[in-house]
Amino acid sequence: MLDAFSRAVVSADSKGAPIGSDDLAALRKYVADANKRIDATLAITQNVSCIAADAVAGMVCENTGMTQPGGNCYPTRRMAACLRDGEIILRYVSYALLAGDASVLDDRCLNGLKETYMALGVPIANAVRAVEIMKIATVAIMTETNSGRKMFDGINSGSGAQCKEIAAEAASYFDRVIAAIS
Amino acid sequence: MKSAVTTVVTSADAAGRFPSMSDIEAVRGSFDRAPARMEAAEKLASGLEKLTAEAVDAVYKKGTYDQANKDKCARDINHYLRLINYCLVTGGTGPLDEWGIAGMREVIRAQVLPTAAYIEAFTYIRERVCIPRDMSQQAATEFKGLLDYLINALS
């Protein structure tokens, strides 16, 4: 597992060169944005159930057959498994976001996920839709563009608009999930 | 690769939980120290060749060690300083542990090189760091901490 720092180290080592001013500029930005990154992570961790439940509910609303007998979310045991998977994906996205690198998501969550879903008969198109809704909800909470109240307590007193770049990074991790299971 | 963030994420993942407030505080602490570490890394990277040459000259001019080993010693000192540069960037001893210290003694011994010369060279570098000419106080503390770590591993 790598983070933004160790990613720079691994690529410098392959060249056998020390890490100089040029590479450090990108890392300085990562450090300068630390508070925003922490806030964005908190935006996920404080709203996990909400994001996952909304996404699964949205997916079911668009395909009402899923909760009927014969549907993939029937009985509740399978619906619960679906909610659990939503939370697991959110957990690895939160790790990747904190680390500033997708390796933890790739190695520990996405590697083999598609094969697992196919073996279990999970409908991929619906799973992709649920991840899409999670992405939209997460970005909205982070940037405070959700309608209504602010949904998390951050350590940074700045506004959600300042989290735009980090939210875009989070969105890219969800896109990675979608790409991996599609 | 071990760093402050990956350590936190590994333990959170082992317990299957989201990053907690104390995890986030730990990460934040490492971010707070990062500017000093990066300053040290930057200064070290720009002066790495010069520092190596100076340290090796200082150790070998005394005539205690076989001059034939001087080039090899310089090559290794350069390598270790590069790993220290990486450690300063990651904020942990991961690069030194994984790429420098594991098997180090065996390799040095197999080449019949004197470890004492390395220790002297690193001690020289440690003593030579001048504040604030070379780097700031905090940066020097981070740098010297890693030099001490390496010296201990060698002795």
Image (spheres, coloured by chain):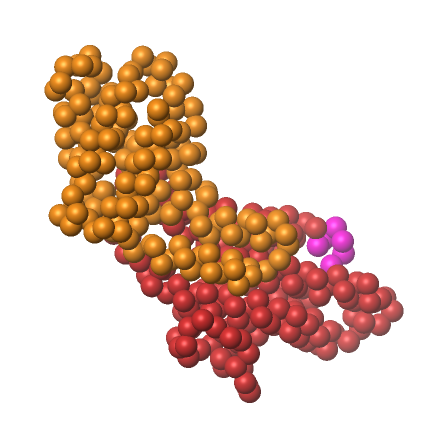
- Give me the residue at 35% from left, 26% from top: B154
Q: Does B121 appear above or below B67?
A: below
Q: How many marks?
A: 0
Magenta stretch: give its range: A117-125
Q: Look at the image and tell me whether residue A20 can be seen.
A: no
- Give me the residue at 18% from left, 29% from top: B55
* Left or right, residue A116 beside residue B155: right
- Which shade of the palette goes to chain B? orange
Q: Nearer the viewer, residue A43 or B145?
A: B145
Picture quarter containing residue A162?
bottom left
Q: Does B64 appear above or below B91?
A: above
Looking at the picture, how far across and down is residue B110, in whole percent?
A: 37, 14
* Left or right, residue A67 beside residue B134: right
Query: Residue B149 in magenta?
Result: no
Q: Quadrant of the C terminus of chain A?
A: bottom right
Looking at the picture, how far across and down is residue B88, in whole percent?
A: 33, 45
Q: Which chain is red?
A: A
Q: Nearer the viewer, residue A18 or B131?
A: B131
